Amino acid sequence: MPELIIVSPNFPPVNTPDHQRVRQSLPWWHNLGWTVHVLAVDPAQLDAPQDPFLLELLPPEIEVERVCGLGLAWSRIPGFGSSGYRALKSIFRALVRVIGARNYTKEIVVYFSTTQFPVHVLIPTLKKKFPGITVVMDYQDPWVNDYYAEHPEITPPGGRLKYRLSSMLDAFFEPRVLRHIDGMTTVSPDYRRVLCQRYPWFSATPWLELPFGGASGDFERISKLEVEQTLFQPGDGNLHWVYVGRAGPYMETAVRSILRAIFRASAADEKLQKVRLHFIGTDYAPPGREKKSIQHIAQQEGMGERCVEYPARVPYSVALKCLMDADAIVMPGSNDSGYSASKLYPCILARRPLLAVFHNNSTVHRVIDETNAGTSIAFDSNNDVDSISQQIQQAWLEPGLWSITPDTDWESFEKYTDRAMTKRLSEFLDAVRTGRNPGCNR
């Protein structure tokens, strides 16, 4: 039986988005013929919110090993803010011990699934020490990111100096790591396209486009545990429309278009005057350091009193409950064409009226069209806010789709579930491990 070693520094009960693929896949690996060992960092050493509910979702048979690195006190030293650097040595030692204890190295696949990019620098050394293993990288976000260079009007996280220094390190390490991986999964085809443009030799590396799956079991668990949320009161006479997830300047076009459309449509429809918009968990900064990025836009669009932004990251269980309690769900997208928005699947599973406003190259449009799960509005750099807001009015507000639960095609949605995504990942990893053509995304 092949063995899968998953490197996921952020792991439940830590409440971060980059472990969701791993966490959602765990219930399915055994039936697919794999044994799984997860390597994670001790949550006490991570400067991130925690949600005990996430532990409730883990299957008991999965072996999770927690490693310790340099403590949080070291994070105040420049260069050690990332747990990827602080736990680097500990993760490598654990990998060596776990792999070394098994003689059948050709049966082992090591899957790095994290946005803690410094951890990936272990790959060349690991491959040199154990040449028989298979190493696959999960490219969830761009490691070397050109977005802020292409959008100089937007200040990158941490400031321009820190970002510039970090980018230099990223540009140094990325090609050295990519040359040693045996395969790659990406949430967006744009990420691989950019990598092939940057490194032509990379086009020979097997890859699989694999969005995060939708986990219906999460919603079933929420209902059984009777989770509550206190951010808004369903049934109070208002229409509560909800967005849950990170936001920022890169979403301004979509956010402003949604708000302007609602403001204008409210003048002709008294029902829409009851709309209250809730933007929840818009900043991933540690507790106490969150900043609002939506509220000032709402003020400018005349929606300040009808819009509330909660920048602090809420527990995953609360986020799902907010989606379930919403009268409608809105999803503003990034002006980055490669943005895939894995948060789409929980929004569909919440079974509420859904509006998605995304760049026209986003895979969100394809998924919504295939599943009939809501209304999607496409835009690009040629569209201004007025034209996008008019599309929203004509396609979603004026026909009253905001009050109608979509007749979702759940049979079509099956291929986007966590079970289906894990099966695709299993087939890909096994093909790469055995040297067969993966038959995926050539």
Image (spheres, rainbow, N blue to C red):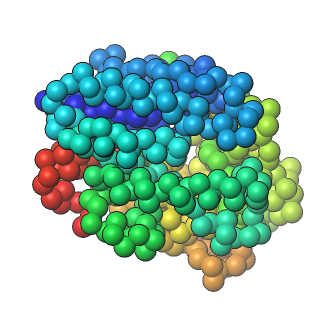
Say whether residue 342 is visible: yes
Q: Is residue 40 left or right of residue 126?
A: right
Residue 64 occupies which quadrant of the picture? top left
In the picture, residue 324 is in which quadrant? top right
Task: Identify which residue, 372 or 39, lies in the foreground.
Answer: 39
The answer, for residue 410, to whether it is visible in the render is: no
Q: Position of residue 427 (x, y in %)?
A: 19, 47
Residue beneath the point at 70% across and 78% down: 384
User: Residue 239 appears at what percent x and percent y?
Assistant: 69, 46
Q: Residue at x 72, y 24 (%)?
A: 73
Q: Is 280 above or below relative to 306?
A: above
Relative depth, front residue between 346 and 223: 346
Q: How many marks?
A: 0
Quadrant location of the C terminus? bottom left
- Closer-to-camera residue (205/430): 205
Image quarter where the N terminus lies is top left
Q: Residue furthest bottom?
A: 382
Say if 80 sits above or below 309 in the image.
above
Q: Position of residue 325 (x, y in %)?
A: 59, 36
Q: Residue at x 29, y 53 (%)?
A: 183
Residue 109, image x, y percentages: 26, 39
Of residues 442 and 32, the one drawn nearer to the viewer in this rendering:
442
Query: Up-down: is 336 above or below 82?
Result: below
Residue appearing at x 86%, y 63% in the figure? 300
